[in-house]
Amino acid sequence: MPAISVTIITLNEAARLTAAIESVSWADEIIVVDSGSTDATLEIARRLATRVDTRDWTGYAAQKNHAAALARNDWILSLDADERLTPELAASLEAWRRSEPEHAAYRVARVSWYLGRWLRSTDWYPDYQVRLYDRRAGSWRARRVHESVAVSGSIGRLKGELQHFPYGSVSEHVRRIDRYTSLAALDLYEGGRRAGAGGLLIHPPLAFLRNYLLRGGIRDGRAGLAVSLLNSAYVLLKQVKLLEIELGGRPAGDA
């Protein structure tokens, strides 16, 4: 039976960490890597996790790779503090552990809670994430934002959902959009992309149509409409900030 080490990176996650850890209480090991919390995060982690490590922030991918390197086991389940495993996903993992792994990593669908409902539409769903992986075959790829696991080998899929509570308020969402579009624009620029008229004029409305019509935001009523508009705004801001970099500026919040 493959043993699983759960890894969680934190910064001031006292309000959400307990529920995240309790959803994986069955794991063989739970590792928390904290980057300087000033709330009760460390106290909670030391009470509930198997191992707690503190480390200066070096980026999402670097923190997660460090957490995986601390594990006793090769199979890593990476969990964010704002996520919870559903009972169906936990059962799927338990069934997986009773057989020989067929893949080097596994994706799981993620569903987000927003404006008082589970949003199963737009670009937010099913939002498949590679979270269970063999560290001998995969690691987190270094990017400023939207980091992901790069795997040498095939990738399977687990049943069930990962519940995501990404924002405590719309204001927090807007602040995150501002920060992430700055980081994404820098990644685009360093990758050789430039902001053209098409990116500014065409990509944002196409993003809205994709989210609201093709990916079913219309089915989620006002919440679906709001998320479709915000996702379109994300695309617009990313392109404008890319243009800002081209003209010699640097978007705020890019650290």
Image (cartoon, rainbow, N blue to C red):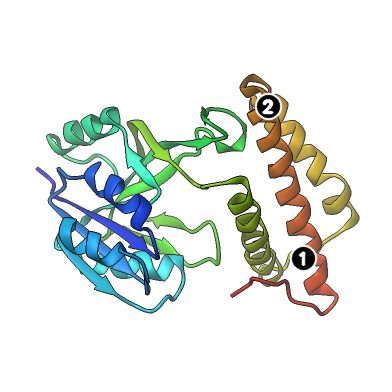
Nearer the observer: mark 1 or 2; the answer is 2
**x, y percentage for residue 135?**
27, 59
Measured Cα–Cα span from mark 1 to mark 2: 30 Å
* Amino acid type indicated by mark 1: Leu
* Marking on residue 242: 1
Percent across and percent down for residue 87 are 26, 30
Who is closer to the viewer here, 171 or 100? Answer: 171
Q: Is residue 113 left or right of residue 137?
A: right
In the rendered image, which quarter contains the N terminus? Answer: top left
Quarter of the image for residue 63 reads: bottom left
Q: Is residue 241 left or right of residue 196?
A: left
Task: Tell me the quadrant of the picture where the C terminus can be found.
Answer: bottom right
Query: Residue 118, can we see it?
Result: yes
Circle 1: is it few (<14), some (14-19), or many (20+) Cα within 10 Å?
Answer: many
- Which image quarter: residue 212? top right
Q: Residues within 10 Å of mark 2 (few under 14, many from 20)?
A: few
**Relative height, residue 37 to residue 96 (above, below):** below
Q: Secondary structure at mark 2?
A: helix
Q: Residue at x 67, y 60 (%)?
A: 178
Q: Which amino acid type is shown beneath numbered disc 2?
A: Arg
Numbered badge on residue 46: none
The disc placed on residue 222 is 2
Q: Position of residue 190 (x, y in %)?
A: 67, 72
Asked if residue 211 is positioned above or below residue 104 in the image, the reply reads: above
Image point 28% across, 27% down: which residue? 88
- The residue depicted at 63 percent of the width and 63 percent of the height is 179
